Amino acid sequence: MSVLSLDALTKTFQRAGTVVDSVKLHIEAGEFFTLLGPSGCGKSTILRMIAGFEEPTSGRILFGDRDVTFDPPNQRGIGMVFQNYALFPHMSVSQNIAFGLEVRKLPSSEINTRVAAVLDQVQLSTLGSARVDQLSGGQQQRVALARALVIRPKFLLLDEPLSNLDAKLREETRSMLRAVHNASGVTTIYVTHDQEEALAMSDRIAVLNTGKIHQVATPREIYEKPATRFVADFIGHNNVVEATVKNASDRSVVIRFHNNAELTLDSQQRAPEVILTPGSRVGVCVRAESLRITTDNGIFAGVLTGVEYSGSGFSCVVSTEFGNLRMEIPSSVPLPAKGERVRLQVAESSLHMVAPS
Amino acid sequence: MKEPVRNRARWQTKPSSIAVLLLLALVLWGYVVGPLVSTFQRSMSIGGNPLSEYTPFLDFGSVQSEAVRGSLMISLLSVISAGTIGIFLAVLLNRWDFRFRRIYKAMVLVPIALPPLMGVKAFYLLYGKAGTFPQLLAQIFHTSPTTFALTGVAGVLLVHTLTMYPYFYLSVAASLAQADDSLEEAAYSLGASPFQAWTRVLLPMLTPPIVAGALLTFMSSMASYTAPLLFEVNNVMTVQIANNAASQQSLASAVAVMLAAISIVFLIAIRAYEQRTVYRTQSKGGARKRRRVTSPVARVVLFISALISTIVLILPIAMIFLLAFSENYSWRTAPLPSAYTLQNFTKLFSDADAWAPIRNSLEMSAIAVAGAAVLGVTSAYVTARMRFRGRGAIDIAMMLPWALPGTVVAFNLIVAFARPSVFSFGQILIGTYWIVPLAYFVRFSPLIFRSTSSSLAQLDPSLEEAARSLGSTWWGAFRRVVLPLVSSGIAGGVLLAFVAGVGEFVATIMLFPRLKFRPLSIAINDELNVGRWGTAAVLGVVQVLLVLAVVILMRRVEDRNTMTHTS
């Protein structure tokens, strides 16, 4: 049974309109679940409704089988890490962490042990008496995490917790969050607009746009089998190329590109919403890393117009009759000169069909 | 699919929230908006043309339209002269470096401590009929002092200029301190001359603080009562209201409504202007460097102009202190009093009657501030954190008494509480002790509202949410997180309101009750009327010292906060 269910959750603001539109979600115990989407997609609003800071316009929120839709935040037993950390500036590190325990009126001996233990867990044992404004951004982040964890919450809610950190610290904090999740087993709901973060950390991801869920799946599935055109565009370096279904059987489908190149795909290589009838249009996701330069005919042809060195290789742009296609060229392969005409091949098995735009 | 159930926002149906909002609306109606409406009703004639009290305003020759013109003219001139002095001093003391600049900078703010009534009297005794300067000049030029005496509108303008320039000085100085040096440097690098840099870059950047200062000065000048009273300028609206408050109440009502309308327009203008962007520094770190003046002539000019301005600004306060040591009736026909004594001070501690007005004022102000703190903090929290229809109305109603001249506030209370009312628990408040603290409560709640609001605006709402998510009740989060973090804002407002209450004269003189409970400003007024200037000045000194004590206290609160909140 899922520990957290959102049932047709909708939030309409007077000015902004409907920012969350009948969202249905089931989150399992112990999951690291991510809400992913561009800014304004409603992901933070969902998190704030789970925490109890916003009230849904309609729909329900269930913790287990308990309806908490209208419970005040202090009766929900959740731990939340805010984007700007929201540490109490008039309290020391330890006082911040102890706050939730004091509110619960635990004996001071237990408060002390639990604060010490969690400080240890986030590697801040020496900074218990420090003022929060003396800490670096990364340390403040860890205090915020410790403060949320120490109350042993039912859920840990994280609202873009890495967005205020520099690149190196972000990596470190990312692995610490995973480690903390593994150690405590707390069901975690993570909000981010960074697809790389989401893919690296999550057990499952819900991709949202304009208040609607586009896909709920594992990171790999999201990456390899995007359910909608939006997901395909948002995740990874996908090129989406239009094609037409030439003929289709139960097992396989032949698609034809506008340059008359034809490919045979497995009919499972598609999003559920794609209908395979002869003559219908589909969008074919061609991932940047699955394109490669070929000496035979290939499928696409164009001129190399952009080259950026990315360390492990080159990120390139090839201008073709289908528009600009992004591709990765590894360092081991000879790099054509800019302006040179290239032919591109792609492995059929790496393709995926979504509804056309 | 079944039709989703529409949920109603929880707090809106919560009885406690509704009760707080209703109570707030009731208080604001009963003591702020309602009395103004009563005045409006009073101004409507019964029978005939209901607006007949307003027709004289359209008649160029009537006393009413003369008063409107007088008030507007004095206010406009005050804006020009206070603006000139304020901007000049701000630029002088913040752009160039010269000897004793820091001392001057501290001194130019001393006039803020000038007490309301005694301060204006000090101006009168310095520059008015038989004042120090006219007498000195008369001795030099062997003529009558009246030749040099500032009288009437000129005297009022002098008082306004030298008491209202801080509105310009403070806002312009703050802008200059924040102004980005690199903007000026960019102008020079693009080939601008110093003159062009000033007119094209710096002055446009100073427009917001100058406009803000002008709006405040205009509003304060419209509200000014004491200066026209002492310099015997009768054709201004405030004096007309006060003079007719008892004898011709419907005429006074119409003038009060007109003055209130003008003030409300300015309140709305100020609020709208506050919403607009302020130019802030964009570059990081590095305190701006002041120009070191190299030309010796320029240095002397700067030094002397700063010296003269400072002396002129300090003189009124110096006069109050000097008078406090002078014997009563010892000033007849010389530039200064002829005999000095400590008796005025010793009497304060030996004579219970002399001390009574101070005690009364402290008490009245304390009562008013206790109520104002509850109202100000509640309404600030409600308008900052709750979303409901009518939030803007509460905000405007809270700031209304700040915009209304003290004369109008007092007059509204006279009209509203001359009869028993629900809000006075069925009593007639006029003539009782309670009308005075009530007036202070109404007038000075906005100060607490404002300072609490701006503290709350700086407080990240997620702090409160963090406390809630950690299990705090609303009250727990308010008490343990919000209150400690806005306490300095509340304290600042409370101290300001308290000081303002202790010195309040304009409303008090219209309302003051039986002699037994004479507040401080009334005692000063009485002593001045019988010529006991020394006794009056001692009470003025007490007011100045109180302001200084509060300023020092606020500094300490601020220091403590910066110590704990930043490293």
Image (cartoon, grey):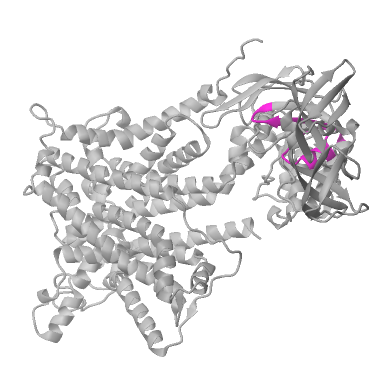
Q: Is residue A77 above or below residue B110?
A: above
Query: In the drawing, does residue B284 fall left or right of residue B153?
Result: right
Viewer-side residue, A259 vs A235: A259
User: Residue at image x 16%, y 55%?
Assistant: B70
Viewer-side residue, B351 vs B414: B414
Query: In the drawing, does residue B88 fall left or right of residue A304?
Result: left
Please tell me in which quadrant of the rendered image residue A196 appears. top right
Name the image quarter holding the N terminus of chain B.
Answer: top right
On the image, the x and y values in percent for residue A279 come to 75, 20
Q: Residue furthest left?
A: B61
Magenta stretch: includes residue A186: yes
Magenta stretch: includes residue B506: no
User: Residue at image x 37%, y 78%?
Assistant: B306
Query: In the drawing, does residue B64 fall left or right of residue B490?
Result: left
Q: How many tags in the picture?
A: 0
On the image, the x and y values in percent for residue B233 come to 14, 58
Residue B418 visible in the displayed image: no
User: Residue at image x 75%, y 39%?
Assistant: A148
On the image, the x and y values in percent for residue B249 come to 14, 39
Name the image quarter holding the C terminus of chain B.
Answer: bottom right
Residue B42 visible in the displayed image: yes
Q: Which residues are magenta?
A: A184-212
Please tell me in which quadrant of the rendered image residue B153 appears. bottom left
